[in-house]
Amino acid sequence: MSVEEEAMLVRPFKLIALLCAFIALALDVAALLSPAWVTSERDSLSLWKACRQPPEDSQCTSTLQTAIYT
């Protein structure tokens, strides 16, 4: 087997790996930007905010707060 034949066999695997890496990165970004990871009738929770929907109006709070323990 010559060097050219070996290079031709390896190349499709590199292209498939690059395509899979791009798809994984796109799905990671979509998951991080998603507004609601967990939803129910009254609540929704994401990485960035938690919302509770009482009958009148929606109330959202940031989940980026840190807890300070003393």
Image (cartoon, grey):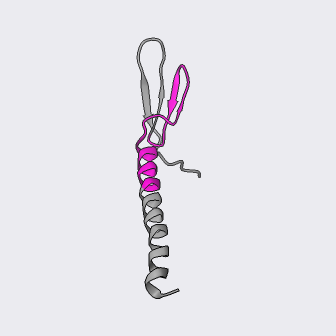
Q: Nearer the viewer, residue 27 or 62?
A: 27
* Magenta-drawn stretch contains 40: yes
Residue 46 percent location from the top left of the image: 48, 38
Q: Residue furthest bottom?
A: 2
Image quadrant assignment for residue 21: bottom left
Q: Nearer the viewer, residue 16 or 40?
A: 16
Q: Nearer the viewer, residue 47 or 18?
A: 18
Q: Nearer the viewer, residue 68 or 42?
A: 42
Q: Residue furthest front?
A: 1
Image quadrant assignment for residue 35: top left
Residue under the image location 43 percent in, 29 percent down: 60
Q: Residue furthest right?
A: 70
How many numbered marks have been drawn onto this rendered protein structure? 0
Residue 10 percent location from the top left of the image: 49, 75
Q: Which region is colored magenta?
A: 23-48
Residue under the image location 54 percent in, 50 percent down: 68
Residue 38 percent location from the top left of the image: 54, 33
Q: Is residue 69 above or below residue 4?
A: above
Residue under the image location 53 percent in, 20 percent down: 42
Q: Is residue 4 above or below residue 45?
A: below
Q: Is residue 22 above or below residue 45?
A: below
